[in-house]
């Protein structure tokens, strides 16, 4: 679960001890790599009340994503990471094939600029996530996406859930994170993958500062 571990064994290995998440050499199927795509809200509400000299809320979002990467094995045959930012529309800031060096990837995440727009198009963010996987296919790689938002979509909003369903139907596991009490919890729940329960596949963070208290998707 999001709250603990997403265990991935290398090719030719599978979990032989669930209690301690130990991988052993077997012939059972087991994903050997992961493609992780963040779909993060970059709309104007993120920094509505921030001082003009900076945006700590945006820094919290970037650090949240960076912290997920720290323990990954980044490489073209290992784990890959993409970052999609959505506001009035969505932009692929980092593609799955862009970085094979972990330090460079983490630095790139922390340097994603905040360009506020007052509209929120979550549907476009999710659609571009689907396309990012389609454009960078890898047989056997686990497809994990983390959706992060602090509010309600107001552009093409009726397509948010259908696109999320399309992603899940194609094999993507979605963890959804809502920040502040402006979030629509029911929609956040429906965006997430089963079991669609708080603390398992979707999460609520009352403030941007408490984002760091949410454990990593993978460990």
Image: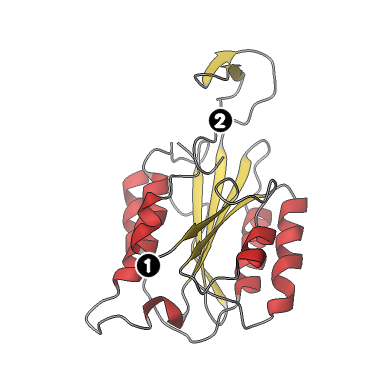
Q: How is the image coloured?
A: secondary structure
The residue at the point 69 percent across, 81 percent down is 156
Q: Is residue 167 above or below residue 22?
A: below
Left or right: residue 58 versus residue 191 is left
Give the secondary structure at mark 2. loop
The residue at the point 68 percent across, 15 percent down is 27
Q: Nearer the viewer, residue 16 or 125?
A: 16
- How packed is label 1: few (under 14 Cα within 10 Å), some, or many (20 or more)? some
How far is disc 1 from disc 2 in space, using C-alphas? 28 Å
* Residue 139 image offset from top left, x and y in percent: 68, 38
Asked whether the viewer can see residue 105, the reply is: no
The residue at the point 40 percent across, 80 percent down is 115
Q: Which numbered tag is attached to residue 8?
A: 2
Q: Which numbered tag is attached to residue 6?
A: none
Could you tell me how many numbered marks the image carries? 2
Q: Nearer the viewer, residue 36 or 47?
A: 47
* Residue 112 image offset from top left, x and y in percent: 37, 67
**Image depth: mark 1 or mark 2 in front:** 2
Q: Which residue is disc 1 drawn over?
A: 112
* Residue 173 image offset from top left, x and y in percent: 65, 48
Q: Is residue 120 above or below residue 175?
A: below
First of labels 1, 2 by sequence position: 2
The residue at the point 66 percent across, 65 percent down is 186
Asked whether the viewer can see residue 10, the reply is: yes
């Amino acid at each position: 679960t999001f709250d603990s571990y997403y265990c991935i064994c290398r090719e030719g290995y599978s979990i032989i001890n669930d209690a301690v998440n130990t991988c052993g050499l077997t012939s059972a199927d087991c994903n050997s790599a992961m493609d992780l795509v963040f779909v993060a809200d970059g709309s104007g509400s993120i920094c509505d009340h921030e001082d003009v000299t900076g945006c700590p809320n945006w820094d919290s979002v970037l650090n949240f994503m960076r912290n997920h990467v720290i323990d990954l094995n980044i490489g073209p045959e290992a784990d890959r990471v993409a970052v999609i930012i959505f506001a009035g529309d969505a932009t692929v800031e980092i593609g799955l094939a862009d970085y094979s060096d972990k330090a460079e990837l983490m630095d790139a995440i922390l340097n994603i600029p905040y360009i506020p727009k007052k509209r929120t198009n979550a549907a476009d963010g999710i659609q571009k996530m689907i396309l990012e996987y389609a454009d960078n296919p890898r047989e056997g790689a686990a497809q994990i996406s983390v959706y992060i938002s602090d509010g309600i979509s107001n552009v093409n909003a009726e397509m948010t859930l259908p696109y999320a369903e399309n992603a899940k139907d194609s094999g993507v596991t979605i963890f959804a994170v809502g920040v502040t009490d402006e979030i629509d919890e029911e929609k956040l729940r429906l965006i997430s993958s089963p079991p669609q329960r708080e603390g398992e596949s979707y999460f609520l963070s009352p403030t941007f500062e408490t984002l760091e208290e949410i454990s990593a998707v993978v460990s």
